[in-house]
Image (cartoon, rainbow, N blue to C red):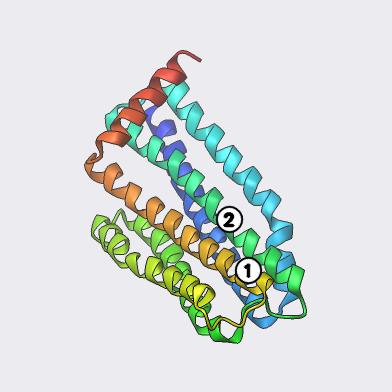
C-alpha cells in the first residue's frame, strides 16, 4: 500500500513539473508571437490551452483522491497540499501566457508593443521565463535556497512593471490609448506569470521544512474536507 501511495506522489510531482515546464514554454511562444509577429506561435499557445486545463484538472482530482483515500501522514500531507496549490499556480501561469498570445494574434501582423517599450518587455519576458524554469528546477531538486533566492530576485519584476506604467503616465507619452492599455496589460501579465512561478517554487520551502503556519492550516482544512466528503 505504501509503495503504491509513493508511486502516486511521484507521479503527481512529475506531472506538476511537466505542467510548469509547459506553461513556461507557452510564455516563450507567446513572447515570440508578440515581438516577432509569429502567428503560428500564438496559435500554438491558444490551441494547446484546453489540454493544459484538462491536465491541471486531472492533477487536482489526483491530489484530492490522495487526501481522501490515503489518510496521509504529516509530511505526505504537506506534499499533496503543496502540489494542489502549485497546480493552481501553473494554471494561472498558463492563463497569463494565453492572454499574451491573444494580444499577439489580435494585432498580427503588427506588434502591439511601442518601440520605446520593446527592450523593457523583452526584459520582463526574459525574467518571467527564467522564473518559470527555475521553479521547475526547485521542485525537481527540492532546493529551498534557490526558492528563497528566487523570491528576492523577483523584486526586479515589480520595478519593471513600474517602469512600464511610468512610460504610459508620462506627459510626453505619444502612445495611442490602445497602445497604452496594451502595454499596461502586458506588464501585468508578465509580472503575474512571474508571481505564480515564484509562488510555485517557494511552496517547496513549506514542503521541505514545514515552515508556514498558513499552509499548515490549509493542509488541516483540506484533510478535514476530504474526510467529510
Q: Residues within 10 Å of mark 1 (few under 14, many from 20)?
A: some
Identify the image quadrant of residue 138. Answer: bottom left
The residue at the far front in this view is 171
> Is any part of residue 125 visible from this angle?
no
Q: Residues within 10 Å of mark 2 (few under 14, many from 20)?
A: many
- The residue shown at (55%, 49%) is 91
**Element type where label 2 sits in the image:** helix
Tell me: residue 144, above or below residue 12.
below
Seen from the viewer's position, the closer of residues 183 and 82 is 183
- The residue shown at (52%, 67%) is 187
| In the displayed structure image, the side of residue 136 where residue 50 appears, left or right | right
Q: Position of residue 174 (x, y in %)?
A: 61, 83
Q: Are marks 2 and 1 in contact (CB under 8 Å)?
A: no
Q: Which residue is mark 1?
A: 182
| In the displayed structure image, the side of residue 74 where residue 182 appears, left or right | right
The residue at the far bottom in this view is 115
**Element type where label 1 sits in the image:** helix
Q: Which label sits on residue 94?
A: 2
* Quadrant that contains the N terminus: top left
- The residue shown at (46%, 78%) is 123
Instruction: Give the mark nearer the N terminus: 2 vs 1.
Output: 2
Seen from the viewer's position, the closer of residues 222 and 106 is 106
Q: Nearer the viewer, mark 2 or mark 1?
A: 1
Q: Which label sits on residue 13?
A: none
> Is any part of residue 34 visible from this angle?
yes
Q: Position of residue 154 (x, y in %)?
A: 35, 65
Amino acid at each position: 500500500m505504501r509503495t503504491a501511495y509513493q508511486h502516486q506522489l511521484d507521479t503527481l510531482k512529475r506531472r506538476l513539473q511537466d505542467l510548469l515546464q509547459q506553461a513556461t514554454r507557452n510564455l516563450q511562444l507567446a513572447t515570440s508571437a508578440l515581438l516577432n509577429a509569429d502567428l503560428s506561435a500564438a496559435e500554438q499557445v491558444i490551441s494547446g490551452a484546453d489540454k493544459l486545463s484538462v491536465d491541471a484538472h486531472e492533477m487536482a482530482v489526483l491530489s484530492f483522491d490522495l487526501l481522501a483515500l490515503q489518510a496521509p501522514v504529516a509530511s505526505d500531507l504537506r506534499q499533496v497540499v503543496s502540489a494542489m496549490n502549485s497546480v493552481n499556480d501553473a494554471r494561472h501561469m498558463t492563463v497569463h501566457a494565453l492572454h499574451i498570445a491573444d494580444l499577439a494574434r489580435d494585432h498580427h501582423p503588427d506588434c502591439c508593443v511601442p518601440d520605446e517599450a520593446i527592450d523593457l518587455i523583452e526584459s520582463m519576458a526574459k525574467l518571467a521565463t527564467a522564473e518559470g524554469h527555475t521553479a521547475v528546477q526547485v521542485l525537481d531538486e527540492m532546493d529551498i535556497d534557490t526558492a528563497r533566492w528566487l523570491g528576492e530576485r523577483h523584486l526586479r519584476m515589480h520595478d519593471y512593471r513600474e517602469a512600464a506604467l511610468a512610460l504610459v503616465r508620462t506627459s510626453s507619452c505619444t502612445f495611442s490609448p490602445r497602445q497604452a492599455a496594451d502595454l499596461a496589460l502586458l506588464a501585468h501579465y508578465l509580472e503575474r506569470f512571474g508571481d505564480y512561478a515564484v509562488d510555485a517554487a517557494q511552496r517547496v520551502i513549506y514542503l521541505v521544512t514545514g515552515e508556514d503556519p498558513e499552509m499548515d492550516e490549509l493542509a488541516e482544512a483540506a484533510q478535514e474536507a476530504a474526510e467529510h466528503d
